[in-house]
Image (cartoon, rainbow, N blue to C red):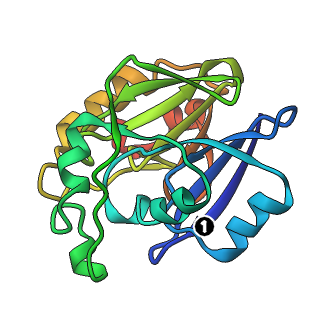
Amino acid sequence: MKVERFVTGIISTNCYLVINEETKQTVVVDPAASPSYLMEHLKTEGIKVEAILLTHGHFDHIMGIDGFLKEYDVPVYVHGDDREMMEDPRMNQSASYTKGYTFADAKPVQDGQVLKYAGYDFEVFHTPGHTPGGCCYYVRSEGVLFSGDTLFANSVGRTDFPGSSSSSLISAIKDKLMTLPDDTRVYPGHMGETAIGHERKNNPFLY
């Protein structure tokens, strides 16, 4: 597995390409935007997008969906509890930062579901708190976790939004993420990557 990070969108959101290097099949995680240089990279490298996985429904993680779908007819997934948010520009906050953006065709996922794409199993961990439908995707075979805005390096997601809950967020992190192996690589929605072992020892929000 090769993971490529592109920082896109108006508040520097991480968009990840999860690439099977043998087949070039790829899963996109959180397309904040679809800039021309990213779309050209996909074509130049012969990358075959298979699906789009969303960690939650906030505008800064979803506004690139349409750009990808113009080029690739693939399914888009989000936890069911965030589907309403994606269809309301006030709830997903796009109305505050842009002219507003909605997307109504996301397929709902639920906790424990496994999505099979690009030769990998993406396990869905429902981790509400930042949003009601916040979730992480764990590729057990590769020791990789895409944590969205649930867990960051030495930090956690904001919980001052409507529908947020700090207690739910911390409980989800402790119960579902801190049980993973120490060497699990964590790719968050913003800033740089980290590891579960590092966060278990150093994240001040978990004590």
Residue 8 picture location, percent across and down: 56, 70
Q: Quadrant of residue 185?
A: top right
Residue 101 picture location, percent across and down: 30, 69
Residue at position x 26%, y 55% in the image = 86
Total label count?
1
Q: Nearer the viewer, residue 180 or 27?
A: 27
Within 10 Å of disc 1 (Cα), the crowding (few <14, some 14-19, many 20+) is some
Residue that mark 1 sits on: 7
* In the rendered image, the vertical position of residue 144 relative to residue 134, given as above or below: above
Residue 81 picture location, percent across and down: 21, 38
Residue at position x 66%, y 25% in the image = 143
Q: Quadrant of the C terminus?
A: top left
Does residue 51 appear left or right of residue 10 in this picture?
Answer: right
Q: Secondary structure at mark 1?
A: strand
Q: Quadrant of residue 161?
A: bottom left
> Mark 1: which amino acid?
Val
Q: Nearer the viewer, residue 166 or 29?
A: 29
Q: Nearer the viewer, residue 23 or 180?
A: 23
* In the rendered image, the vertical position of residue 120 relative to residue 70, given as above or below: above
* In the rendered image, the vertical position of residue 3 relative to residue 118, given as above or below: below
Q: Quadrant of the N terminus?
A: top right
